[in-house]
Image (cartoon, coloured by chain):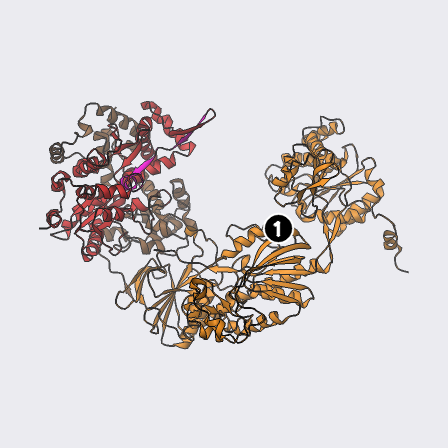
Chain colours: A orange, B red, C brown
Amino acid sequence: MSSPEPLEERAPEGPKTPPAKDSMTPRIGVFVCHCGSNIAGTVDVSKVREAAEKVPGVVVAKENKYTCSDLGQEEIIKAVKENDVNRVVVAACSPRMHEPTFRSCIQEAGLNPYMLQMVNVREQCSWVHSKEKDRATEKAVDLVRMGIAKAEKLVPLEAREVPVEQSSLVIGGGVAGIQAALDLAQMGFKVFVVESEPSIGGRMAQLDKTFPTGDCAICILAPKMVELARHPNITLLSYSEVEDVSGFIGNYSVKVRRKARYVVEDKCVGCGVCADACPVKVDNKFDMGFGKRKAIYVPFPQAVPLKYTIDKDNCIHFKTGKCKACLKACANEAIDHEMEDEMVELKVGTIICATGFDIYVPMKRGVYKYWEYQNVITGLELERLLNASGPTGGHLIRPSDGESPKRVAFIQCVGSRNKKIGNDYCSRVCCMYSMKNAQIIKEHEPDTEIAVYYNDIRAFGKGFEELYHRVREEYGIEFIRGRPAKLSEDSETNSITIRAEETLLNKITEREFDLIVLSTGLQPSEGSKRIGKILSLSLSPDGFFQEAHPKLRPVDTAVDGIYLAGCAQGPKDIPDSVAQAKAAAASAASIMAGKKVKIEPLTASINEELCIGCGLCVEMCPYGAPEIVETDNGTKAKVVEALCHGCGTCVAACPQKAITANQFTDEQIASEIVSALGGMEGTNGKARKPAKKAEEA
Amino acid sequence: MSQYAYFFGCIIPNRYPGIEYAVRWVCGSDGFNLDVEDIKEFSCCPVPGIFYSSDKNTWLLLAARNLTLAQNERREILTVCNGCLTSLLKATEYLTDPKNLGKVNRVLSQIGRKYTGIPRKTEGRRRIMEPVKVRHYVDLMINDVGLESIAEHAKRPLKNIRAAVHYGCHYLRPTENQTIDDPNDPVNIDKIVETCGATSVEYEDRLDCCGAGGGVRSHVVDLANSLTEDKCRNIADAGADCIVTGCPFCLLQFDNAQKSFTKEGIPVMHVSQFQALAMGIDPISLGFDTHHVSAHSFLRKLRGT
Amino acid sequence: MGEVEKTFISGLREKLVEDRVIDESQLEPDFAKEIVKHGGKDVMTCLQCGNCTGVCPISLKIDYKTRSIIKFCQFGLKKFTLETRWVCATCYRCYEHCPADINPAEVMIALRHIAIKEGVIPPFIKMAASNLLKYGQSVKPDPEIERVRRELELVDMPSRDKEYAKVVREINLLVRSTGYDKLIGIESEVKT
């Protein structure tokens, strides 16, 4: 004996929304929202409602404190049913947030959800005209009148559904990419991980320890890397590049170039005999140029996959054709110098972009003399020098003479928070990694004197402030507030003198150090620009990828079905990267778990009779939605609805006026304009007068 | 189109006529034979340390007056001084703002002048104007004359000379106006010096200020001299025979300040004088006798005696 | 660690290190805005990192710190910046290194403008301006140099030319139009 009402609602058979009801003579319901005092504080809502009531075609007009609340929505449903309303105008906030809310609300009331017109009287009226209340009210009346005029011309639309490919592509195999891939695989989706380097692991694999807890970075990362390689749902494409992405949410097709590593992955067991045999030694990029590796190599011992790669640029065979030492050494016949790049095509439903960051490279002949003085190194170089599996076995040395430095200075904010070089943002990790490294140096060599030149210390995360106090109080690290102005080298000892104003002492000092560490900031990785173009992602002013909404959609992008994880979206520490990766995985999963995705019907449609197949729309479209097809009636354009964003560019461009944007038809917009001009066209010609009256009253 | 107009400013004609002679000689028929003319009505640029520092309206008016003279002749202004360069260049930038332009032209109309810029091209009936070009002597040598031509004309390479190059602040900074050279690592004067056959010595803090600028020399001469002393010490440490600069005000500072802390002093000359020497001019014409620091040691070394 | 040794210039130190006891009556709350009005950037956005002091050639010599001047501006301590503003060499090194893009050199210039308005006018400004009004150039012609010019067969200084009187008249008119002559107190020298 449950309540009978819901049963009744579920009852209708066939189409949920009877079209007859929608297309009848317009019976419009207008709902004006107070939005607390956001609107009502400036606009006289009652006057707006009264004015709306008088417009022909309006059968009911109401005002609410909060129209979006349950109470407000119930009132809409009730008014629609009671007054046989077939078009609804809501005058409230921007449609960005609540248009979907009201669409489902009127659908519940039995209308087609697209028979809704929202009028923005908050952002575009009350907020910007808060000082002119009367005129704001007048404007709100005009806006509502225009909305009513458009509502008269609305036609019902149906959303389409398309199936979603049950697989995901993760671009980038750093900690964020790894975490996102593992989460998705765990949920049962197929995942392809594309990494441009021979091994996954990313920047985190290069770090020594992590702040603030001091966990060894590779020790906590390696198990995840191995788990990823072993997971039955994950296909790892290392040493590969994404070349092209086409399609739309749920149906992306991706072209991946598998770069030739000249070693057959299936045959290589990672024994390293080939590297022993290789006669070529080059700087190891993974060790930031400090250590050496062979021309056939794995970047680091814990590499995943543990497959060797030939560095073509340095291999003697590729230069002269004379050496085949590795080929002779390999017992498994895994070496293949004839290997060529291979293209792989993937079908995926969602994409997670985790392309990470690069370290800022100090400029040539700049103040900090990175390129001139050997004993000036960057933070990431220090990580390698402190790392037990690094080039020095974890023993900190000065690059100039290999001695252990007794006086070390860190210089903060190199390449961050600097408007002069265009990096205005804080890189968020430099303060903490410097403290962490200072602590490690002190632990290795307790008699080292360490100073940190800083502007502001940003110890904002969990356990960060505690680390700050620990290194100051327990480890005796000196913090000097001031930005160094000049570095000069002693030509004999290669020690470096820093001149700076110590702003807390109000003194200009010169201090000598054995080693200078520049706490270089983070910037978007070189490869991410290319990926950004392929995925048509927009960039925020700092050069990192732009999220769809900074607060409410932090992992989404403007492109449906593509998500961001890790430092590709902005500088982050490891926990934040992992958290964002998990969020991106969940967002991608929520699309795929639905199996189908709704495609908004607010797209462009082409009138084949008028179309001459000129192809201008194809040229103009930023999303590649229209295409030229051969039909029985000749060459015509056709819009792939799933790709169309309804932006209207093609509509404006079409010389034949053959394209219509749904819900923004010429007729609808014209009626709005006519109404705005005071109604020269019959239907609501009298509307102007009530508005004037409202103002006078 | 006609090319350049000499703008010598105040210091060169009134203190170091040798520089004026050298520039005219290098650009004239004995040298590169460039199309340069005198515009007699030019006044002081006006000097940034005085007028830009005390009243921008007056500064802009006086600078705009100079710019209109070059504009009417359709010529680029060839400055030989960093101060003139920065003052006039900044003025052209100020005048791209219509508000400033209107204000300036209202006053200029009283003396029958108007700043419009030089027409670059016409689009339909509209003429596209560009600001009057203000060029530095070094910029002209590097970009218009070219190092190859400089090398060809350097008939008497200054082989045994070690020169310390001083650029001067306003040749390099502020970077928003100056784009002739890399502000962190300028090379143009070094290139000219090397092309003339001499060695440009590297010395510490070579981009530091001479000490004179911004009215410091006029206001607290001891302070200015103390900065020059540091600079000269570094230059002497590098074993330079002379200081070569692109700015007559820096030159004046080096020339006058050295007597306050040393007897001998390092001779200092403008890059045009240096170039003229390499091109075979008689040193007598370079007016070294108007310099306070004697150039004898330098000229002896040049002759190889 | 050693503090950079300074050469104190006689007399200047006393002038710069004035009695620095601050009470509220000495603060001018809108000083930052006044600086903006005179073409400086907003000093309130300064990070106080001290980079400008470190690169400033003057700060290494005397008791003058670019950062402190900016700090005084933030406080509104107009009085403390009266003398110091004239020792800036406008070398723009501070501008090149300022991470907050304040352009301290232009702030110094704005301070000079304010000083001039307050009547703190160093004599060399008057001298250069009078030279300009008399000769069209801010450096006074030197007979000895003019002799050398003739020796070198250089054209005579234009200021010797009769037609140049017109130029001088124009300059006088321009200077009068902005009231610059009155501003720096040389109105008696302006020709009409």
Q: Above or below — where is A562 with respect to A262?
A: above
Q: Position of residue B244 (x, y in %)?
A: 21, 47
Q: Position of residue A108 (x, y in %)?
A: 80, 49
Residue ID for mark 1: A558
- Magenta span: B126-143
Which quadrant is home to the N terminus of chain A?
A: bottom right
Q: Above or below — where is A584 with respect to B82?
A: below
The chain identifier of the residue carrying mark 1 reads: A
The residue furthest front is A322
Q: Position of residue C67 (x, y in %)?
A: 35, 53
Which residue is located at x 45 percent, y 57 percent?
Answer: A416
**Observer-nearest of A273 and A335:** A335
The amino acid type of the residue labelled 1 equals Ala
Q: Is residue B128 magenta?
A: yes
Q: Is residue A471 magenta?
A: no
Which residue is located at x 37 percent, y 47 percent?
Answer: C103
Q: Is residue B280 visible?
A: yes
Q: Above or below — where is A411 with respect to B142?
A: below
| Dot 1 alpha-carbon crowd within 10 angstroms: few under 14, some 14 to 19, many 20 or more | some
The residue furthest left is B305
